[in-house]
Amino acid sequence: MDGRNNTVSPLDGAIASFRTIVDGQMESIAELEAWLQERSASDKTYQAIASSLYPLLARNKARLLEARRTGVSSTSSGPSSWCTVSWSRTSANTVSVTCLGLDPQDRFDLQVPDGHVDSVENVVGLLANALDNLAATDAHMSRLARLIDDMEASAVRGPPGEIVHNHIRLLGQYNEAKDIAQQLIGLIADNRGVPVGSLYQDDRYGVGPDD
């Protein structure tokens, strides 16, 4: 025993949660890519969907990698490019899709074999939900990043009264950060279709099941 205090500070805990949530977001993107690859392996309709989505996924994955490498502050200055997907059946064998790529204004028509329109619309709907969850997670991550920036600015030493005040403020900000982290974990779990509790194992995201 060396007698050192190994207690993690609220700020360090918030930063650790942020970084592991970034990792979770990147894993969600990787899983979506793998799902698209499996779907498009032998179907031209899904190949068209995947081809439009891969550049969008790559851009956001690169942004998250940069946030993981450089720290929290880069996230608030680098917004995501997710957008809300919409689609409509324009003929018996055509589904027109908007916002399934890098340009939110892009619209393209999917030519669907007879009897498969319902299936394609269902897949597009699943993708829309997945991208909505990724966008919502990014929005919460940006809020968490800004909160951590405030916590860092508050962690300045001063007179004893100011130190106590800042400590109380940090604890309040940490509780808010923890609430945001729990919301993010819920979104990641929803995107993967797994129970929220499964993501709390081993305190992976800095928030355990008893928090």
Image: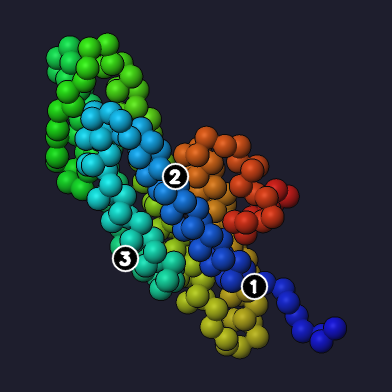
| Amino acid at circle 1 | Ser
Residues packed near mark 3 inside 10 Å, few (<14), some (14 to 19) or many (20 plus): few
Mark 1 secondary-structure assignment = loop
Give the side of residue 76 with respect to residue 115, left or right: right
Q: Which residue is mark 1?
A: 9
Give the side of residue 156 with respect to residue 52, left or right: right
Residue 127: percent from left, percent from top: 35, 34
State how many labels appear: 3
Of the numbered discs in the image, which one, if any, rests on residue 31?
A: 2
Residue 155: percent from left, percent from top: 55, 78
The residue at the point 33 percent across, 19 percent down is 119
- Of the pair 125 and 179, the residue shown nearer to us: 125
Q: Is residue 157 above or below residue 142?
A: below
| Picture quarter with the N terminus | bottom right
| Lower sequence index among marks 1 and 3 | 1
Q: Quadrant of residue 117?
A: top left
| Amino acid at circle 3 | Ser
Residue 175: percent from left, percent from top: 60, 58
The alpha-carbon separation of the residues under discs 1 and 3 comes to 25 Å
| Amino acid at circle 2 | Glu
Mark 3 secondary-structure assignment = helix
Question: Can residue 176 be seen?
Answer: no
Mark 2 secondary-structure assignment = helix
- Of the pair 123 and 42, the residue shown nearer to us: 42
Q: Which residue is mark 3?
A: 77
Residues packed near mark 1 inside 10 Å, few (<14), some (14 to 19) or many (20 plus): few
Q: Is residue 131 above or below residue 124?
A: below
The alpha-carbon separation of the residues under discs 2 and 3 comes to 26 Å
Residue 113: percent from left, percent from top: 22, 17
Nearer mark to the viewer, of 2 and 3: 2
Q: Quadrant of residue 83?
A: top left
The residue at the point 39 percent across, 51 percent down is 139
